[in-house]
Amino acid sequence: MRVWRIANVAYAQFDGEGARRYGSRWTRKGRPAVFASATLSLAALERFVHADPDLEPVDLVAIAMDIGERIVVDTVDIAGLPQDWRTYPAPPALTAVGDQWLRAGGSAVLSVPSVVIPHERSFILNPALAAFRTIRVAEVEPFSFDPRMWKAR
């Protein structure tokens, strides 16, 4: 399965340091995790919603990763989430889901619904597991947003 990630060149490594330092909707601060999306377009939208509207991101790269068939992927379905799972800031129940998955250490990948587009999937990768090291970077290429995304409305 191919998944995508968009990152600044300086933060393109797969060590989970960003999530460890800042936390996320799905993980508590202090726990390393790497995030990816099912498609490049979803990765772009996920990146865009976190971008500072005053700063157009530069030096971005699109990173394609291949998750092998032997890697176990756990799945979280929308039906199992609280009704407010898409709110901002994220409800603590979502952090609990990710933290419980990380602590269990049963799989290197957790598939979750995208908050941006719930019918699509985002992936949380656990860099602490040996199976994570079998995920291969397939390609890295420069990425930029269409400048119209940054124009004032």
Image (tube, rainbow, N blue to C red):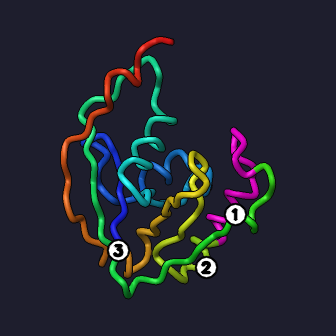
Question: On residue 104, which mark appears?
Answer: 2
Q: Which of marks 3 and 2 is nearer the N terminus?
A: 3
- Range of the magenta residues? 85-100
**Gap in Å between the C-alphas at discs 1 and 2?**
21 Å
Q: Choose mark 1 or mark 3, whichever is in front.
A: 1
* Residue 91 % position (x, y): 75, 49
Q: What element carries label 1?
A: helix
Q: Mark 1 points at which residue?
A: 78
Query: Would residue 23 appear left or right of 85 to someone viewing this image?
Result: left
Magenta span includes 151? no
Residue drawn 81% across and 54% down?
A: 83
Query: Would residue 97 appear left or right of 48 to someone viewing this image?
Result: right
Q: Identify whether 100 is placed above or below 26.
A: below
Q: Can residue 27 be seen in this view?
A: no
Magenta span includes 89? yes
Q: In which quarter of the image is residue 36?
A: bottom left
* Residue 68 % position (x, y): 33, 80
Q: Relative to the observer, which residue lies in front, 41 or 61? A: 41
Residue drawn 30% across and 70% down?
A: 66
Q: Name the residue under label 3.
A: 67
Residue at the top extreme of this rendering: 152
* Residue 101 % position (x, y): 61, 72
Q: Is residue 64 visible?
A: yes
Q: Evaluate if marks 1 and 2 touch, with contact meaning CB atoms under 8 Å apart.
A: no
Q: Which of marks 1 and 2 is nearer the N terminus?
A: 1
Query: Would residue 106 appear left or right of 13 to someone viewing this image?
Result: right
Residue drawn 42% across and 53% down?
A: 17
Q: Choose mark 3 or mark 2, whichever is in front.
A: 3
Q: Evaluate if marks 3 and 2 touch, with contact meaning CB atoms under 8 Å apart.
A: no
What is the crowding at mark 2: few (fewer than 14 residues within 10 Å), some, or many (at least 20)? Answer: few
Q: In which quarter of the image is residue 128?
A: bottom left
Tell me which amino acid carries mark 1: Ile
